[in-house]
Image (spheres, rainbow, N blue to C red):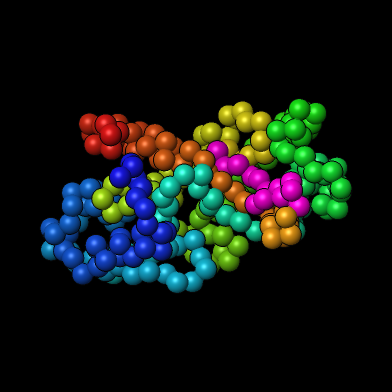
Amino acid sequence: MTPFNKNITGYKNENEFVNYLNGKKISEIDPMFVEFLETLFGKLNGNNVIHAWNNYQKQKADIYIEIKNKRKAISIKKGIKNSVHAEHIKKFVQFLKENNFSDVLINQFLKYHYGDGTADGCGNKRISSAEYKIEYQAEIDCINQKLNNDDCFIKKAVNKFILKGNTNIESIDCIIYGIVEDFIWITKDEIINFLLSKKDEYSTGIHISHLTIQPMNRCLNKNPRYEKNRHYIQAKWYNISDDIIEVMINRNNSMGEPYPSYVKK
């Protein structure tokens, strides 16, 4: 079994967390789970009963955990190259317009997105992102400078991509990364503060902090099966496990705790 992963689907993974926690007392669960739950709920009593259930709505929360009538919404991730959000390109462009991005910059973004010389994907010759960067890296850098220039915009993007999604109904309280036997976690406030702290890190691709913004599929071979995916963007958090470990080390250091066991894997 690789760290934080095993060969099960995301849905099965969510079910395993629910089945492990639901109906148990704090005294009956693994110490790693106790540490996780006390990060969310504060100090707990061994007799406190945990209630957990799946969220089957199309929202950012995969499961809910409730203790002492306090409910927390949890997103669960595993594996690599984690996509945290996807939406039609028109919705993302509208988001940029609502946040006062210029038509010139939006046009530059669309040309990067489609990679065919147009802002609507109707060009004949399609090139990869690597090819595009050879000639237009200066434009990409300008886009990134604007995307990462304003803390308020970054917070809105984090809400849209990670915490709330497009429904804007409720925010998740935490991301778990991993499986029942082996996991790490990051809280809502830690997500926001961490991504704000990384806004100035350089990347050759379009990004907002550590979130890469890219087409769902460039469809360079014009396969009709994937053609519609050209018109969707996705936000990927490629180094999510490393970033969460960094946050957890800082959390433990601030509490005067030794490095947690997951750092020694």
Left or right of residue 16: residue 43: left
Q: Position of residue 52 (x, y in %)?
A: 30, 67
Image quadrant for the N terminus?
top left
Q: Nearer the viewer, residue 179 or 24?
A: 179
Q: Quadrant of residue 116?
A: top right
The span shown in magenta is 210-222
Left or right of residue 28: residue 3: right
Please tell me whether residue 13 is drawn above or below residue 56 in the rendered image: above
Residue ID at (75%, 33%): 131
Q: Is residue 213 magenta?
A: yes
Image quadrant for the C terminus?
top left
Residue ID at (61%, 56%): 86
Left or right of residue 263: residue 111: right
The answer to whether any part of residue 163 appears in the image is yes
Please tell me whether residue 249 is drawn above or below residue 72 in the rendered image: above
Q: Position of residue 232 (x, y in %)?
A: 69, 56
Residue ID at (58%, 38%): 209
Q: Nearer the viewer, residue 102 or 131?
A: 131
Residue ID at (34%, 65%): 15
Q: Position of residue 152 (x, y in %)?
A: 61, 45
Q: Position of residue 74 (x, y in %)?
A: 39, 59
> For the stretch drawn in magenta, what is the main secondary structure?
loop
Q: Nearer the viewer, residue 96 or 42?
A: 96
Q: Is residue 10 magenta?
A: no
